[in-house]
Image (tube, helix red, strand yellow):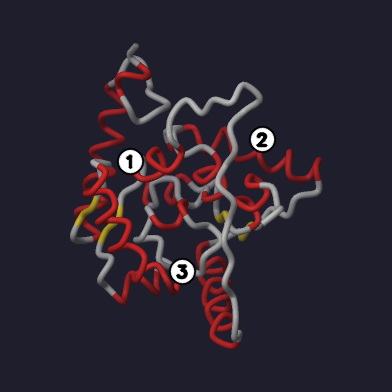
Amino acid sequence: MTQDWTELQIQTTQDYATDSWFFNVFTGGLNHQTTHHLFPGVSQIYYPEITPIVREACKEFGVRYNYKDTFFQALGSQIGHLKRLGQQKDEHKFVDWPQPDANGKINRDWAELQVESTLDYATDSWFFNVVTGALNHQTIHPLFPGVSQIYYPQITPIVREACKEFGVRYNYKDTFFQALGAHIGHLKRLGQDKEKPIVTRPEVWKG
């Protein structure tokens, strides 16, 4: 695929109600889905500051930025998207692996960072698979942004086994409320840190 990785991340996501403190807290910043994909190691407390910058950059460079004003508009869009997928015979898409910079360096493996900075929950629940648009499979979502979410329940077990095999931390909670509790606890820890981490590995930001 020749499409730019960053452009693909933006065009395959949708933000909603990004000015709402309620959704910023309740969703863990996932209403800023575009920023979440572009900067997986940045704490969600910074998303409201970053999203307007990303939006302006999209306008400047002619990249489609998907946005809905309310949760229910976003949910309606999601349902419509699932309906269209069901009417298509072939919707298979895949993305290129991100390339190193001019010096040939990536400070940390991108896939590992994506996996360790996300948390899955209730991945066997048809209810959350539908209502959240499969965002309960949050690990798969950033790893394969071009793959339809209808395949997430099949891919998640494979990724989980791969994490076990290669010693990568896979974060999982059995229920939505456990995941919500973990998120609230994470926000509490961030509020108590004098230095706010922007990456998930302490040895990187603490030196």
Residue under pointer 2: 53
Which residue, as the protein is rendered here, is positioned at the far top?
207
Corner quadrant of residue 124: bottom left
Left or right position of 167 against 33:
left
Whether residue 64 is situated above or below residue 199 in the rendered picture: below
- The image position of residue 8, as x and y in percent, is 64, 53
Image quadrant holding the C terminus, namely top left
Left or right position of 81 against 142:
right
Q: Say what amino acid the circle numbered 1 marks.
A: Glu
Image quadrant holding the N terminus, namely bottom right
Name the residue nearer the viewer: 207 or 1: 1
Residue under pointer 3: 149
Crowding at dot 1, Cα within 10 Å, few <14 / some 14-19 / many 20+, comes out as some
**What mark, if any, has residue 43 been given in the picture?**
none
Whether residue 1 is situated above or below residue 114 in the rendered picture: below
Corner quadrant of residue 111: top left
Mark 3 element type? helix
Q: Are marks 3 and 2 in contact (CB under 8 Å)?
A: no
Q: Say what amino acid the circle numbered 2 marks.
A: Ile
- The image position of residue 109, as x and y in percent, is 43, 35
- The image position of residue 149, as x and y in percent, is 46, 69
Name the residue nearer the viewer: 207 or 112: 112
Residue ID at (44%, 34%): 41
Q: Nearer the viewer, mark 1 or mark 2?
A: 1
Residue under pointer 1: 116
State how far apart marks 1 and 2 are (Cα).
26 Å
Mark 2 element type? helix
Name the residue nearer the viewer: 88 or 31: 88
> N-terminal of the two: label 3 or label 2?
2
Left or right position of 91 against 140:
right
